[in-house]
Structure formats: C-alpha cells, structure tokens
Amino acid sequence: MLEMVINARAADLGHGLTVRRVLPYAKRRMVGPFVFLDHAGPVTLAAEDTRAADVRTHPHIGLATVSYLLSGQITHRDSLGTHQVIRPGEVNWMTAGRGITHSERFEHPASFAGGGLELMQSWVALPEADEETEPAFTNTPADALPVREEAGVWMRVIAGTAYGLSSPVRTHSPLFYVHTEIQAGASLALPGGYAEQGAYVAHGEIEHGGQLYQPGQLLVFGDDRDALLHARTAATVMLFGGEPLGERHLFWNFVSSRKDRIEQAKADWKAGRFPMPPDDAEEFIPLPG
C-alpha cells in the first residue's frame, strides 16, 4: 500500500550545481536504512565554472555514502588515500564509521560527458554496532553488478538483494537498491520482502493506483509485493529500502543514534582532528554556522 508521496525540493550546492533533495523529509526521515537521497543534474558546466563547483573535503560519521552515476564522471579522494574516478553504472560505497573525510572533484569536459553530470547520491545509516567501525571504501565496476532484462524492464542491483539478484557490494544491514529502466507500456512490481520500500522517479512518468507520478517524486510503500508501477512513458526509476534501524540524528554530514556523538564530531571537525585526504587537504568545507 502506498503510504506517502514525497516531492523533491530544489537545493543549490553553489556555482550552478543544483540537486533535487528527496530525503530526509520532515514527515519521513528514512526509508529502511536510507537517510539521505539527492538527485543531481543532469548538468553541464563551462570549463571556467567547473573548478568552483567542486565539493571540497568534508567529513562523515556513522553512515555509508553511496555514489551512483547515470552520466558523467567524478573524481573521489578520501582520508584513506583513495583516489578513484567513478563512471556511470559503478558504485562508490564509502563506509564512514568512526570518521572519514573526502572530496568530489569535477574535471572538464569528462565530468559532463554523456549529456551532462547526473548523480544519485544516497546515505545509508549503519547499525548501532557498526557506527564506530573502521572507515572503508570500495568501488564496484558496472560489469560486476547483476543485471536482468525482461518484459520491457531492465534492472541493475546496485546494493543488497532484490528480484532474486544479489549485489557483491558489502552492506551492514538488510537493504536493496536497484536502478531500473522501464519501457513505455511496461510494468514492474516492487520486490517486497522488506519492511520499507521506495520508488523514486528520476525520468519519465509512471502510474500507480490510477495516479500519475512525475520526475522528482518518491513513492513510499511498506512490505508490498503487489504494488505495481506502470510506465506511461519510458522511465528511469530508482528502487530502494530495507529494514529500519531505529531513530537517527542528522546534522550536516553526520549521522548517529546518539546526539552526543554528533556534538563530538562537530567539535572534532572544528578543531581539525579529522584525518584529511593526503592529496586533497588544502581546501575544506567549514562547519556550518
């Protein structure tokens, strides 16, 4: 059963880089363990604007960031010494745990190839037992992810297990994250088997229960295998969800089950106690406020 529809809000990251911010939402903070979802682009920047749009080094705790490109290219650097270029269809899964810093840089013209930069950026909360785990980073290439195509629906399982397919990306709790391309006139049922499920319309138009939904809308369901999404036009839909982990507190880039832990992270960043990427330590984003 459809529980809620969330309309993305426009958020300006500065210098021409705008996003549709889907989660968190005032009336729905999480879907399964997913606490954050941004849809950036597609956007093309002029060469002289690219440098200014870079996301400078910043910290995270208590979560895993999941970067998935539909087009374009991003260069990732982090405090573990990682220097990774991510391309469409690959998964950058960065486990922040007790603390990590990273940057995301754009190089002209590669970052805006294929119709412009288009990024799905999500955060997955960690179980309480793993919130202080050692930070880690993995890049999983597109050809290592399971893909299925039938009855007008193409799908790639980015993380977790759905539709009988399992991603090799290591996760910390039961979840699923699936990229689907649905041809006009085709239908897809939600995977089911999870307490909370979301369907985000990135492109095209889908119909559910006699209602039409547009790009930038997130449909939130419970554990429903009978919920059917029908594509009125060719559509890109991101499916995600899983088992809830309990309440989480968010401030800026910090996520924790404990308010005091977030206060500690704020103090640590302000005092310069977070490790920095060895090849990107010069520029950083100050603590808000």
Image: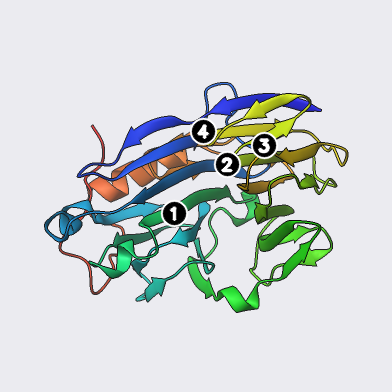
Secondary structure state at the residue bearing disc 3: strand
Q: Earlier in the sequence, mark 4 or mark 3?
A: 4
114 or 51, nearer to the observer: 114
Q: Earlier in the sequence, mark 3 or mark 1?
A: 1
The kind of residue tagged 4 is Pro
- Quarter containing the C terminus: top left
8 or 78, nearer to the observer: 8
Left or right of 154: which side holds 54? left
Q: In the rendered view, tell whether residue 177 sits above or below residue 8.
A: below
Residue to which mark 1 is pinned = 119
Left or right of 203: which side holds 144? right
Q: Earlier in the sequence, mark 1 or mark 4?
A: 4
Q: Earlier in the sequence, mark 2 or mark 4?
A: 4
For the residues marked 2 and 4, what is the alpha-carbon distance in whole angstroms? 23 Å
Residue to which mark 3 is pinned = 206
The kind of residue tagged 1 is Leu
The kind of residue tagged 3 is Ile
For the residues marked 3 and 2, what is the alpha-carbon distance in whole angstroms? 7 Å
Secondary structure state at the residue bearing disc 1: strand
Residue to which mark 2 is pinned = 204
Residue to which mark 4 is pinned = 24
Residue most extreme to the top: 27
